[in-house]
Amino acid sequence: MSSLQPENVCQVTQVVEDESFRDFLSRGEPGLAVVAEPFHDIEQPLLRSDGGDFTKWLRDEHPDIVVEIPSADYLVLQSSDVWLPLVFVATNIGLPVYLNLVSAYLSDRMKGNLESDKTPAHLSVEFLDGQSGSVKRLDFAGSPDSLRELAEKIDLNGFFGG
C-alpha cells in the first residue's frame, strides 16, 4: 500500500509561459535557481518563507551545487507548514536529485519533532522533460515521507529523465 495519503497532492503540468525557465537554461549555469513568484494580488514577486533557510542548508550541506537566489522580499506565512520556493532545476541536477535534496533538508529540519508531528511541505519545481523537450512543473503538498517515496519512484522508474 502506498503511503501517499489523500491529503498529499502531487501534480505535474506543462508550463505554458516558460520564458524565465528557458532563459535560465540558456545561460548554461549549473545547479538550481530559487525563483520569486507572484502571490495572489501582490504586485511584487515574493520568495516563499522557507527559501532562505533551504538555500543556507544547501550551501552548507552541498557546497558543490550552485544555487542562484534573487534579491527579493519573503512571503511570511503564519503556519507550521514548510513552504519552499519555486526552483528551476538545471539539466545537470535533474528532478530526482532535487527531490532527494529536499527530502534530506526536511529530514534535518524535522529532527527532534515528535513522531505525531506531521508537518506538511509545499514545493514547486520547474524542469526540462528530457523525453518531450517541454518545460514541466511539479507541485507537491504533503508529508516529507510521501515526498521521499515520490523521489524514490521517480528515480527508479526514470520518469522525467534529462
Image (tube, rainbow, N blue to C red):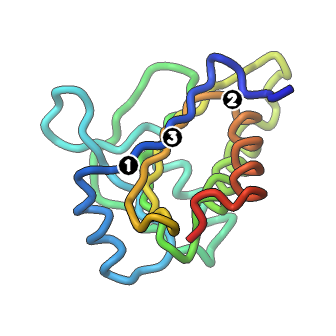
| Alpha carbons under labels 1 and 3: distance apart | 16 Å
Tag 2, which secondary structure?
Answer: loop
The location of residue 87, given as percent across then percent down, is 44, 55
Amino acid at pointer 2: Ser
Disc 2 to disc 3, C-alpha distance: 11 Å
Task: Report crowding for label 2: few under 14, some 14 to 19, many 20 or more residues within 10 A (C-alpha).
Answer: many
**Foreground tag (1 vs 3):** 1
Quarter residue 74 falls in: top left
Residue at (70% x, 43% y) in the render? 150
Quarter of the image where the C terminus is located: bottom right
Q: Is residue 44 left or right of residue 118?
A: left
* Image mark for residue 14: 1
Which of the numbered marks, if any, corresponds to residue 143? 2
Q: Is residue 78 above or below residue 151?
A: above
Distance between the Cα atoms at labels 2 and 1? 24 Å
Question: Residue 38: horizontal and vertical position, in percent?
Answer: 24, 39
Residue at 32% in and 81% down: 27
Q: Tell me which label, 2 or 1, sits earlier in the chain.
A: 1
Q: Amino acid at mark 1?
A: Gln
For this orientation, the residue located farthest to the left is 43
Of residues 72 and 154, the one nearer the viewer is: 154
> Horizontally, is 96 left or right of 45 in the view?
right
Q: Position of residue 3 (x, y in %)?
A: 79, 27
Tell me the residue at 71%/21% (across/down). 5
Residue that mark 3 sits on: 123
